[in-house]
Image: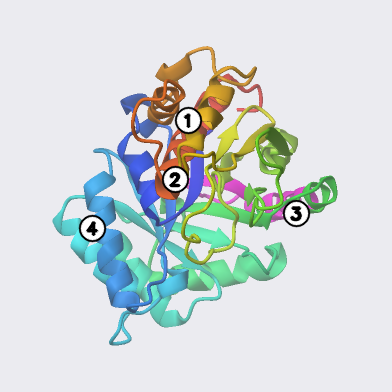
Amino acid sequence: MAQYWPILKARAGEFKALARLRDHEVSTLQPLFEVSPSDDGPTHAGLKFVRQLRESAPAGLTVGVDTTYARVNDDGRPLIMEIANDLALWGIPIAPVIRLQDPDEQFSACGEAARLHNETAIVRLGSITTDPDPVADSSRISRALSIAKINRERCHLVVDMADVSSERDVSRAEQIARNVLDSLGNQEWASIVVASGAMPSAITNVPRNEATPLARWDWELWKRLADRGPDFGDYAIAHPEMQGPVPRGPIPSLRYTTSDHWWIYRWARNETGGNDSFYDLCKTLVASDHWPAEGSNFSWGDSELARCARRQPGPGSATQWRAWGTSHHLAHVINELASSPAS
């Protein structure tokens, strides 16, 4: 069975979902967190990340940590080392993420961080603006791992195709990913992952008071690469880019994952104001064809959505809606991988 590598933003909703993972899900999941920048500076961002992970990480879970968006702390030292040291004290294992565009000092810091945590690291190719380049990346990988003093067989390779939002994007990404796998896939990696994301950067143009399907092009890309056998990675229910703060007071909404689509729900506020229309949203969801047969037992997120459908108090906020949607998504993908012929 393929492992699941969700690339998650280090935000409250994602951590709430992480904390509610079930035991059998922990063994299949390899989350990679992108440390979110902070208006209070990178040191604060690192401390916040450590606290959130310490409060939510299930036992036995190793978390990838990417500090691209907050690379150095307030005094200029690599933030990954601060995070690695703090989490080692709490016995929470991590795998630092190496990006080939990083400076040499970052490579060295990732190596030191890896040696604090099982000597494991993640090499992440590509970005939101740059595709992986198998010819150039091969020598750059060797150089980065030499500086980091990490053995390749202790590293996971993540081929990140970033945003895929159409059939054309998937076809382009498939060819690039195949070229990378042909060039680098025969090397001694701990595992190889192909990741991408298909959620739009915003859903404000989606109609209100009805469920709207959006294609999961990231899942389609992975299925097309099944003959190469990579693990599956996505950006869960978020867009690949690091987004700014969630606008205050968004209307009740939910991103709900099914086999080949997300169903996007946006519900206009009713006469009571507040977020009470989320109850109506959930009532529509549980009566739909895409509500799982297991119902509220499918995931923690689904149990909360079922509670709201019964109009039990607590319609939630944007953070909770994201947590519930992420919880369902993680459970759905894990089940999907377990039953997929591609895995």
In space, the residues marked 1 and 2 are separated at their CA atoms by 11 Å
| In the foreground, 273 or 303 | 273
Q: Which amino acid lies under the numbered mark 3 shown in the image of this protein? A: Asn
The residue most toward the bottom is: 75
First of labels 1, 2 by sequence position: 2
| In the foreground, 266 or 270 | 270
Could you say which quadrant of the image residue 214 lies in? top right
Q: Is mark 2 on a helix, strand or loop?
A: loop
Image quarter in which the C terminus is found: top right
State the residue position of label 1: 279
First of labels 2, 3 by sequence position: 3
First of labels 3, 4 by sequence position: 4
Residue at coordinates 42% horizontally, 19% vertically from top-left?
A: 296
Left or right of 187 on screen, residue 55: left
Q: What element carries label 4?
A: helix
Contact? badges 2 and 4 (CB < 8 Å): no
User: Tag on residue 179?
Assistant: 3
Is 155 inside the magenta-drawn segment?
A: no
User: Tag on residue 321?
Assistant: none
Q: Which amino acid lies under the numbered mark 1 shown in the image of this protein? A: Tyr
